[in-house]
Amino acid sequence: MKKIAVLTSGGDSPGMNAAIRAVVRKGIYHGLEVYGVYNGYHGLVNGNITKLELGSVGDIIQRGGTILRSARLPEFAQVEVQKKALEQLNKFGIEGLIVIGGDGSYRGANALTKLGFPCIGVPGTIDNDIVGTEITIGFDTALNTAINAIDKIRDTASSHERTFIVEVMGRDAGDIALYSGLAGGAETILIPEEDESIDDIMERLNRGKLRGKKHSIIVVAEGVMSGVELAEKLREKIDSDVRVSVLGHIQRGGTPTASDRVLASRLGARAVELLLEGKAGRAVGIVENKIVDNAFSDIIDQPHYIDRGIIQLSKELSI
Ligand code: F6P
């Protein structure tokens, strides 16, 4: 293998740049030519591909976002579109592709692999919802962003004796809500993986009130319902002042934490090694601090694992 390419796809995540840097530097270290595909699968189909040098990825390890930019291309599910991508890859003489992204991005990489083109996936998403890895690139940074916001909201919630609802991202997964809620000391955490009724929430709020609590933080994952919707439901039942804060896309930006940079560097480099070993159709991940790899077919569309122990702990600590 002489030429490989790398792209970022789906929602960006802090640390993607560190992963791109690792792919480029590791590839060049092993004598490969490394190409960057701009704008995800969209750029792949349209041939928006450029050769990257060592210097192309200088000064990016600390930057959020992705220098290769990202996009979502639902049409990539169609075989004719995938074939256009193959034409471009062949035109540039590229023999292997590394896709940094989430589940949807893996589906595209799996399709190309099935058409005979070797692809390797690197888990880059703030949602932490990829099977086969305990943590995804960007999750730790997003978590810290959320915790920072919750800490600030707690100050004003306490001054005004209010109930605050903080809506966080995560799509269908509750990891950002669960871990930021636990680390931010939220009184209630609502995640899609666990059913909780409005009455349960009320009971919690009332219990807090009885022991003199004047304010309360509820973290809700967007996959459960919107913060505004939850506020409407709560306002029907309590007379406390309820406010909503939607953290939104600030969770996707910012300087990656040390943890995300190290993870991205390790995973990006391993992805290159897999291509060099002649592997295809696999995604790298981390389990018990060891870098692993799994077949796309074993991880795509599999139920997301959430740590029930952490759910239980968060409940016990917020009584
Ligand atoms: O997958 C990452 C994510 O940020 C989700 O948490 C969120 O639901 C979604 O992307 C938002 O996507 P977009 O930026 O396209 O609105």
Image (cartoon, rainbow, N blue to C red):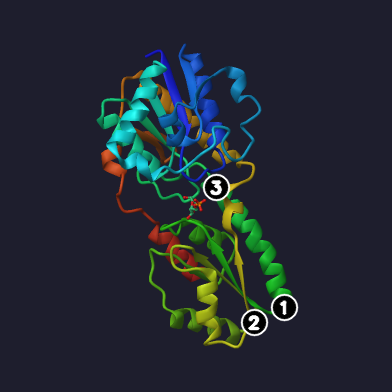
Q: Where does label 1 land, which residue?
A: 160
Residue 140, which numbered label? Answer: 3
Instruction: Judge left or right: residue 309 versus residue 164.
Output: left
- Amino acid type, label 1: His
Q: In the rendered picture of this protein, how many numbered marks are placed on residues? A: 3
* Mark 3 or mark 1: whose residue is earlier in sequence: 3
Mark 3 near ligand 1 (CB under 8 Å)? Answer: no
Mark 2 near ligand 1 (CB under 8 Å)? Answer: no
Q: Where does label 2 land, which residue?
A: 241
Residue 211, which numbered label? Answer: none
Mark 2, secondary structure of its residue: loop
- Residue at left offset 31%, top offset 43%: 299
Mark 3, secondary structure of its residue: helix
Can the viewer see residue 293? no
Residue 160 position (above or below residue 247)? below
- Residue at left offset 56%, top offset 87%: 238
Distance from Cα at disc 2 to Cα at disc 3: 32 Å
- Decide which of 131, 35 is in the foreground and name it: 35
Disc nearest the viewer among 1 and 2: 2
